[in-house]
Image (cartoon, rainbow, N blue to C red):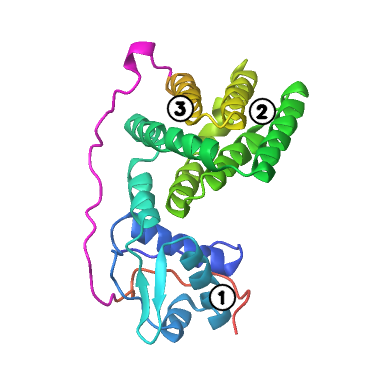
Amino acid sequence: MILKAVTKTRVYQDIVTQFKDLIADGKLRPGDQLPSERELSETFQVSRASVREAIRTLESMGFIETRQGEGTYIAPSVETLLASVTSALDHRRDFFLQVFEARKTLEPAIAALAAERASPDLVEQLETILTDQARQVAEGETGVDADTRFHAALAEAAENRVLLRLNEAIMDSLRETRERSLQTDGRPARSLAGHRQILAAIREQDPESARKAMLHHLETIEHNVLQLPAEAAGTLARPHSSPKLSPGSTVHLSGRLSPHSTEEERA
């Protein structure tokens, strides 16, 4: 593995990026143990504080886990697996087809649960988000921030932590695509209309209507992003390949990680 010099950014962010790339490429696998904080500090040529911040960030993102008294390991989490697949298939049509298939499986269920479980406060939050989206659209903006917040709030309303984290992982991988999709003529207004139909079903506590409204909303987005004919909805292109993940052992990162290229934050 060839290591690259770190660009002049916040030091810990470059460390995070290097680890994410190694995980995505399958060079670090679930179950692999990372070197000690001291060894990583020496390898990256940065302060131990920067290494600790990177480890905290990777752990919060679900890429690694710290086991008390044992060490730090690559986590066998859904987020890690999804990130690996995402990196391997990024910018490919089949990747987006798979993501939309996942969204059409996941988000209608989230909408149905939200219709059953959403508290009055969360319904009010959804209404506020759509008011903000309507203002953005009226001012000629894409409304992507409000669009993202609406889907995130729905996942929260479903009151299922696993669904929430899965939804977050998928949404993070689609930020650029969502922005591009909403730049299409008429697309922001159609997105807002779809959201209003979903919210109406949630207000009525009608899970089936919420499920159908979300599915229709996602199919509309899919056709827009991929320019699919209606009859192609639901057709899934298989990936060319994906990295195989298997439990590993303690890994030796010499020659895999790049030292930081500036003196910033070194101690």
Residue 38 visible, this angle: yes
Assess whether mark 1 and mark 3 are in contact (beta carbons under 8 angstroms): no
**Within the image, what quadrant is residue 248 found in?**
bottom left
Label 3: few (<14), some (14–19) or many (≥20) C-alpha neighbours in 10 Å? some
- Residue at 61 percent across and 76 percent down: it is 263
Amino acid of disc 3: Glu
Q: Which residue is mark 1?
A: 50
Cβ atoms under marks 3 and 2 closer than 8 Å: no
Main secondary-structure element of the magenta-colored stretch: loop
Within 10 Å of the Cα at label 1, are there few (<14), some (14-19), or many (20+) other Cα atoms? many
Secondary structure beneath dot 1 equals: helix
Residue kind at label 2, given as amino acid type: Thr
The residues tagged by marks 3 and 2 sit, at their Cα atoms, a distance apart of 29 Å
The residue nearer to you, when weighing 9 against 148, is 148
Query: Residue at the spot x=45%, y=86% of the render?
Result: 38
Check residue 250 for magenta coloring. Answer: yes
Above or below, 246 against 134 in this view is below
Mark 1 or 2, nearer chain start: 1
Q: Which residue is mark 2?
A: 142
Asked whether disc 1 touches disc 2, contact meaning CB atoms under 8 Å apart, the reply is no
Front of the two marks 1 and 2: 2
Label ID, residue 208: 3
In the figure, 262 relative to 76: above or below?
A: below
Q: CA distance from mark 3 to mark 1?
A: 49 Å
Point out residue 158 in the picture as x, y percentages from the top left corner: 51, 44
Label 2 SS = loop
Type of amino acid under label 1: Ser
The stretch of residues the image draws in magenta is: 227-251
Q: Secondary structure at mark 3?
A: helix
Where is the C terminus found, in terms of image quarters? Answer: bottom right
